Amino acid sequence: MANLLLVCFDNQAYGPNIRVLAAVVNRTTAHRAYQLFFHKPSPTYHQPFGETPAELNDFTRLLDELDIDVVGLTLMTHEYDRAVKLADTARRAGRHVLMGGIHPTVRPRECLQHADAVCIADAEGVIVDYLDAFDSDGDLRLPSFVLPGEDPEAVRASGRIFLQQDLNAVPFPEYELDRVFYGAGDGVLQMSWKDYRRLNSWEGGYYRLLSSRGCLYHCSYCMNNFFWRHYGECYLRRRSVENCIGELVAARKLMPFIRGINIQDDSFFMGSDEWIDEFVTRYKAEVGLPFVCRLIPAYTTEDRLAKLADAGLIHVEVGLQTGSRRMAHDVYQRFQENENFLEVDELLTKYGVTKTYDTLVDNAYETVEDILATIDVISVLQRPFYIGAYSLTPFPGTDYYERARADGKLELMADAYNSPLYATDPQGYYTPKTLRYLIESSPYLPRRLLVYCRDHWRGNLVTWLAPRLLKWRNLIANVINWGRNKAPWFLQLALKLNSVWSKLRYRMIRNKQTTVEAK
């Protein structure tokens, strides 16, 4: 029997990958899996936010107390340095170290310098075989795993990988807390439900569901770009409605404090109308909680939206990214048209679904005209809405990363290792501050004021006003974040009021248009 410690560096106690692997190991074998969450903010140019000496000491203690044989680390690029420190600590203590997740999949050679094996694809169907082989001193050259001395790309090209095609065969994520620990700054502690709720947004009240894997888009800057190139359409998979509803019902029994569902799919709206119809029917009858999701406008129809809103959809997150067709098509390889985006925006308002629109800034390829085009789209959005502004980050393995490196622009943008999504290097390129301030504060400005500031953004008045508008935006955002983390009932009420406002405002606009047309 082998004891496995699965470690996640997420900034919350979420970690669906290690929860699923723990379920696979604990429910089907004699091996035993434990979970450890080290939650830290994302690193910046000046602050790495690594584990404390007390946490590292307690990590070593935990290895002994639990008699751990294998340490499995799941990581993204900005977690690499933290994972290396933990991996080296574990190996000095005589433990076998595995690395998996997005970064080891993309840069296995780098990770093999600090690990005994790297997983470059899915592990659910092979982790037990690996533990069996490890426990019996067998051959570890198994699907998805690359060992030191092997060529990772040769392994990938040979087809020695595992992709979990039948997602229904995967156990539900393991949320029982008897084998779960977390880093508490001054050490490592066993997690309680109070800890779980404190470490997650909305006090853990919104359960996260993944009904599918993969994305229909191939955007040049996204890691899905890498997966499409290496795994093609095999990368797109979806669970049955029966399986998804079963997970939600089980989760509600275990966690009665759940008050909503957060569907984490890259695009929940992809797939067949039949799947959506069955989901709506079963969800209303067996779950009946409000839910949020992500969508891609190209796969959103009024019929689908009306059904999902009736089933409890209250909020969506949508990638606008840019209002510039040049940037969308030529740089991002994101073939989304503004006209379709605005049509979906109007439909969301019609059905009272609140929305967050993500935008990309601090991109060394952008021009002022590109940024102004984004503000042009924002200025005609139906209110209310929220805006997320993220620094374009060239992630290793993507087409965008290779283009930026070839063009000598890589060092100008956010570093995937130490400042992902929020560029912090003072020597880098940044979107003109006035324009970025306008983008971020746009949801809270009168439309006419936003348009005026856009047209006169170089003027002294606007350059003086813009940072003050951002302070106003930050004040509102702080209230929203307080509601999300400390008083979920407050945010629930705000979303409900926004929904009512959306519907009333939409009707007022439509009535006004009808009156004008009648005249």
Image: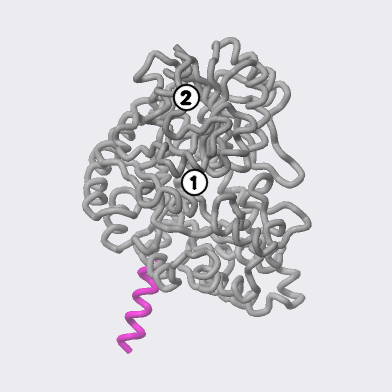
Q: Distance between the residues labelled 2 and 1?
A: 49 Å
Q: In this view, does 103 lie to the left or right of 514?
A: right
Q: Where is residue 380 in the image (x, y as percent from the top left)?
A: 49, 73
Q: Name the residue under label 1.
A: 491
Q: Which residue lies furthest to the bottom in this view?
A: 519
Which label is found at residue 140? 2
Along the viewing direction, whichever of 237 and 284 lies nearer the viewer: 237
Q: In this view, does 379 lie to the left or right of 464?
A: left
* Residue 34 seen from this side: yes
Which label is found at residue 40? none
Instruction: Decide: is 159 above or below 126.
Output: below
Name the residue rendered at 54%, 29% in the picture: 117
Amino acid under label 1? Leu
Amino acid under label 2? Leu
Q: Quadrant of the C terminus?
A: bottom left
Instruction: Decide: is 495 above or below 133.
Output: below
Under circle 2, the secondary element is loop
Would you say the magenta stretch is mainly helix, strand or loop? helix
In magenta stretch: residue 517: yes
Along the viewing direction, whichever of 370 and 433 lies nearer the viewer: 370
Q: In which quarter of the image is residue 258?
A: top left
Name the residue rendered at 65%, 31% in the picture: 84
Neighbours of disc 1 within 10 Å: few (<14), some (14-19), many (20+): some
Q: Where is residue 185 in the image (x, y as percent from the top left)?
A: 68, 26
In magenta, the rendered stretch is 504-519
